Amino acid sequence: MKLNTKYHGAIEFEKENIITFKKGLPGFENLKEYIIFPLEENKIFSIMQSLEDTSVGIPVLSPFSICNDYEFSIPQEITESLCIKSQEDVLVLNTVTINSNYKSITTNLKAPIIINIKDKIGEQIILDNDKYEIKHPIFQED
């Protein structure tokens, strides 16, 4: 299948790669189906592209690529609603806020996107944990 996106051109994808968000995502509640593809220019980032609105492509990354000690428990109701049976079935992503100044690029560690990669369903949750920030800088100075 092929999707002509507004910002990333034509993207080839397979029907089995479609991830369904029953509740949508905060701010995009009406958009339920997405695909994820890596950004060729920068392997740390991927795009979570809406299939219903080709102008909506959300930059995401794995929190573990920037935060070695990132950990949380998935609430039982989310585990059940996403039919998660094993840790190996879970993909965790965080949204990214892009800025022309790379030092101002941030990720939202407070609201991870949880995806059951086996059943291709997902949901964004908000952690009840003050340890993680909504605007966590990705490129930290040493």
Image: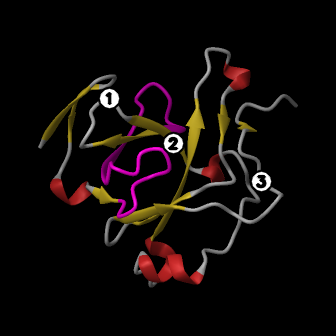
Q: Earlier in the sequence, mark 1 or mark 2?
A: 1
| Tag 1 residue | 55
Q: Characterize the local packing of mark 2: few (<14), some (14-19) or many (20 or more) Cα atoms within 10 angstroms.
A: many
Q: Write the residue at 60% across / 74% down.
A: 74
- Span of residues in magenta: 21-45
The residue located at (45%, 38%) in the rendering is 58
In the image, is 20 to the left or to the right of 132? left
User: To which quarter of the image does residue 52 belong?
Assistant: top left
Give the answer, above or below, for where 7 lies relative to 142.
Answer: above
Report, in whole angstroms, how far the alpha carbon at label 3 lies from the one at label 1: 29 Å
x and y, in percent, of residue 51 in the image: 25, 43
**Circle 1/circle 2 CB separation < 8 Å:** no
Q: Helix, strand, or loop for circle 1? A: loop
Label 3 sits on what residue type? Answer: Tyr
Q: Main secondary structure of the magenta part?
A: loop
Question: Which residue was labeled with disc 3?
Answer: 132
Q: What percent of the width, then of the height, locates residue 42?
A: 50, 29
Label 2 to label 3, Cα distance in Å?
A: 16 Å
Mark closer to the chain start, 3 or 1:
1
Q: Neighbour class for label 3 at 10 Å: few (<14), some, many (≥20)?
A: some
- Tell me if residue 29 is in the magenta stretch: yes
What type is the residue that disc 2 sits on? Answer: Val
Q: Circle 2 is placed at which residue position?
A: 60
Q: Is residue 50 above or below residue 77?
A: above
38 relative to 60 in the view: left or right: left
